[in-house]
Image (cartoon, helix red, strand yellow):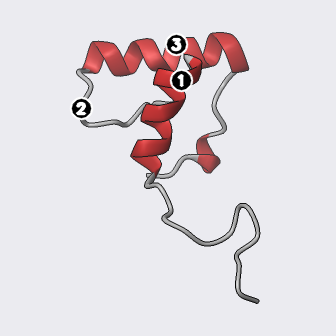
């Protein structure tokens, strides 16, 4: 094949770029409760928002 079908090939964006683009283009925020860039109160707010919107976190599913 001399061409690449749409969605294949090219440069793959890193996860941080996908998150950044999602926020800027669609207003979607993806943030980890364990993000070291956040202060403790900010991480706690993220955790509380997640629990309010989606329920308790499954402790075994965490990626520590």
- Residue nearest the observer in this picture, 24 or 32: 24
Q: Which residue is mark 2?
A: 37
24 vs 55, left or right, is left
Q: Residues within 10 Å of mark 3 (few under 14, many from 20)?
A: some
**At 55% from the left edge and 12% from the top edge, which residue is drawn?**
49
Q: Is residue 42 left or right of residue 1?
A: left
Q: Position of residue 3 (x, y in %)?
A: 71, 79
Q: Are marks 2 and 3 in contact (CB under 8 Å)?
A: no
Q: Is residue 32 visible?
A: no
Mark 2 or 3 closer to N-term?
Answer: 2
Disc 3, SS: helix
**Do the CB atoms of the residues marked 1 and 2 lie less than 8 Å apart?**
no
What residue would you read off at disc 3?
A: 48
Q: Which residue is mark 1?
A: 25
Q: Is residue 11 visible?
A: yes
Q: Position of residue 35 (x, y in %)?
A: 34, 36
Q: Residue at x 68, y 13 (%)?
A: 53
SS category of the residue bearing label 2? loop
Q: Is tag 3's residue or tag 1's residue first in the polypeptide sequence?
A: 1
**Real-space Cα separation, disc 1 to disc 2, in angstroms:** 22 Å
Total tally of numbered discs in the picture:
3
Q: Secondary structure at mark 1?
A: helix
The residue lying at 52 percent from left, 13 percent from top is 48
* Left or right side of 64 for 28: right
Looking at the rendered image, the disc whose residue lies closer to the viewer, 2 or 3, is 2
* Vertical order, 57 against 39 (above or below): below
């Amino acid at each position: 094949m001399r061409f690449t079908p749409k969605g294949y090939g090219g440069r793959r964006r890193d996860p941080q770029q996908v998150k950044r683009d999602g926020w800027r283009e669609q207003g979607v925020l993806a943030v980890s409760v364990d993000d070291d860039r956040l202060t403790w109160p900010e991480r706690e707010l993220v955790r509380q928002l997640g629990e309010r919107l989606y329920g308790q976190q499954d402790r075994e599913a965490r990626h520590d």
